[in-house]
Image: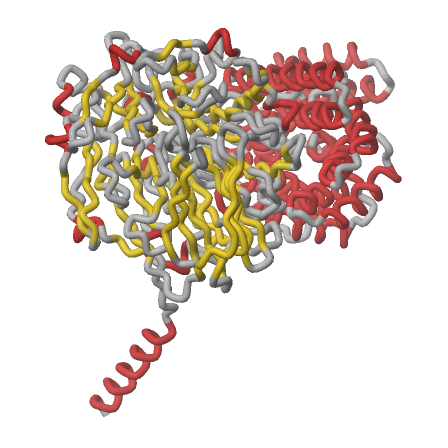
Amino acid sequence: MKAALSGLLAALAAAAALAQPVARLLFRDVTREAGITFQHHAAPEKKYIVESMSGGVALFDFDNDGLPDIYFVDSLTVETARDPQAARSALYHNLGHGRFEDVTDKAGIGHPGWGMGVCTADVDGDGWEDLYVTGLGGNHLYRNNHDGTFGDVTGRAGLAGGGWSTGCGFADYDRDGKPDLFVSRYVKIDLEHLPEFGKGKTCEYRGIAVQCGPRGLPGEGDLLYHNEGNGHFTEVGARAGVSDPRGYFGLGVAWFDANEDGWPDLYVANDSTPSFLYLNQKDGTFKESAFPMGVAVSEDGAEQGGMGVAVGDYDNSGRFSLFKTNFSEEYNDLYHNDGDHFTDVSFRSKTAPSSLPYVGWGTAFLDYDDDGLLDIIAVNGHVYPQLDKARLGASAPYRQRRLLYHNRGDGTFDEVSAEFGPVLTEERVSRGLAVGDLDNDGRLDVVVNDLDGGAQVLHNELEGAGHWLLVKLKGKGGNTDALGAVVTVRAGGRRLMRLVRSGTGYLSQDDMRAHFGLGAAAQADSIEVRWPDGTSSRMDEVRADRLLEIDQPR
Amino acid sequence: MRALVGLGLTLALAVPSSGQTPAASSTAGERDRALEKAAADAAAGRRSVAAQELREAALRFHSVTALLQLARLEAGQKEGARALATLRQALALAPNSEDLLSAYAQVALASGAPVRAIPALESLTRIWADVADHHYLLGVALMQAGDMTAAVDALAEAERLEPNRVLTLVALGLAFNKRKLYAEAKPYLVRSLEREPESVEAVAALAESEEGLGELDEARAHALRAVARSPDQPTANLVLGMVLMKEERFAEARDALEKAAAADPTSAKAHYQLSLAYARLGDEARSRREVELYQKALREVEERLQELRGQAGSAPAAPRP
């Protein structure tokens, strides 16, 4: 009897195990086996807002070996503020075969101070990627010495910035052939006179004491640096009309051509204030147009806590739309580009409801399954550790899961993170995210910098993904990255469009190479490049499943 | 939402109070006669005389009933602050009186002071946990105070205790809409309309849910139905305007949104959407003007929330600093 019962229980247990849904493998966490040990430093209690906002991550090929390397930004804390060595940002060289090597010390870029964000560009047109790191109390331009080392040329370049810089992005806004630089800034903060934790109306949340700000703290204006071409940049923000004299709380930065006139426009995700869309007037100035263009605030007119911003043509319409991550109980915005304006389609697209509980940060459009449709990823995590002891309301707790939206191809998305197991549903406190193809296998990988805890490298191992193309551009003149170029691939009856961009998501840098999922199409009918100077080039009948380098015709 | 409160207020204050003063029988007789005379004077329209009589009775007999009747009189004359003061006196004598707590909460709500109402309603829901009306009113108070999450919890309890009450169903729909949980809002509103099909407020709220769910045809139909019955219904006009905006019928959208903004000039959303409609029509000046009105409305909402948080009692959940 006993044996029969135990046999029955075993059978039931086996049946129950079989009934458990098995997660499909999409991303595998390869951080440890890849040799990545980076851990972002953070104060446990986050008593000050400056301890909650770092840090970015960059994928860029610093040694021109054809494989994207990784740079993680670290930050100090109020306690360690006087010791720049207490934080160590890290550069990992991609050795291939899934292995990385920490080359930070040799590169000399480990201690940029209180780091926040990162963006890359070949600022001097020598064909080697340079690195710009933002932070509190001064930014750094690290010039690539072509030998695995970098030189800090910030002073000579005039790019120190100052204050609390956050987002950054290079673009040739005046089309003079040299990449210029925009830097967003957040709040004015004085480490000697910090706003006291929990004291005052802007220092509590749901009745509990929390860090103060950003509301109630003075905001800091933004910076635009014009590249003079002699190693020096000139700050022209006020003259260009992008200096943000009202001091909105600037974070994510996106250069893109919003109105299809061939000139780079600029979107700035502002926290707790309306976001900016600066339309390029083609004369070195910009006109702030976020309200009439419909991308300043939510559909309700609510000012949101804008953090990260992604740019992508998710419906293959030939126009770049925007996705912006926000604070909890708001929703992440999907602004569809309708040509001369944008429409908030967040609810219609079904991306909004699942985002409501989360504080969103790093984000990107990515075609993770190579089906020819851009999907969306967003990483989350609250800013108040104290939240776990409080009434949560509609907000998720301090640690939060990720969101992955699969594009259905009809203007709507399914949130599918649960299908892919703990690598996406595990609750973490994430900030920066960068997307790229780390092993050139045509499937996009994801790298995340968490505020608390270790970083993550998520390798895409999806079975049955579609055909693909990876396109690396080489621009002529000083803009060798071809920043602002648009690559259009026609394949399988679709027209797919990608933008080469510096400064992506939340204070981060995606792999600049244009990735295309082609679905069942084994070749591209054509590849057309609209170069930043307005010229274009074209290739026909290009075989799929390979990395392609295209040089701008001389 | 004020309409949802108003009905409850009238009913609760009309409930005769049970005797609560431990007076000797002769004193009780005098007290009862004084109260009857005051009631007669009030019924005859001699409100100031009645009020004076009730004040004297309250003073002389320490009568909670006199104070409650006086508060009722004051509330009826739109003297909310005075009525609240009177009820506070009564609560000092009988702090756990259900009638007094309920009256205090309802007067506070009707006076636009939900934060004052919330502690009273929290006491009521704690002591008389099985009375649906207390949970409902707590939900309404929390909605007014801007804490939609807590409001939903209270309203859901009211719905559990007394299922299918139309006022509760509508309030739940409104609270979920405010939280942008349109899929959750819709079933409550559909159920409320099954029971009270003519409710313009519920039809408009259902249109809002549908618009949020991307069901534009259904949203338009319900918005038009609400507008047909009540041409100035602000939510219905707003939803209609937003549907038309999404269909790029900007001139028609502008017309609907102008009605929405006129019907509720405090609606930041209406002014913001109207600014977009003008921008699409190329009218930059009017678009800018509507952005200014939107910003003004936004500031006023913020000031109102600050004012509410400054009121005595438990503070509503503060948004992010």
Give the left or right position of residue B168, taking residue A284 as reference: right
Q: Nearer the viewer, residue A285 or B174?
A: A285
The image shows residue A22, relative to residue A393, as above or below, that is below
Q: Vertical placement of A217 versus B267: above or below? A: above
Residue at screen point 18% across, 47% down: A95
In screen coordinates, is A351 left or right of B246? left
Q: Position of residue A47 (x, y in %)?
A: 28, 23
Q: Is residue B155 above or below residue A14?
A: above
**At x 38% / y 9%, what residue is drawn?**
A234
**Quarter location, residue B124:** top right
Quadrant location of the C terminus of chain A in the rendered image: top left
Q: Position of residue A496 (x, y in %)?
A: 54, 48
- Who is closer to the viewer here, A333 or A371? A371
User: Is residue A115 visible in this depiction of the protein?
Assistant: yes
Q: Does residue A189 appear in this view?
A: no
List x then y, in percent, for residue A130: 28, 27
Task: Tell which residue pokes out farthest to the front in this image.
Answer: A554
Q: How is the image coloured?
A: secondary structure
- Total marks drawn? 0
Estimate the x, y position of residue A59 in percent, counting from the top left.
Answer: 30, 39
Quadrant in which the N terminus of chain A appears: bottom left
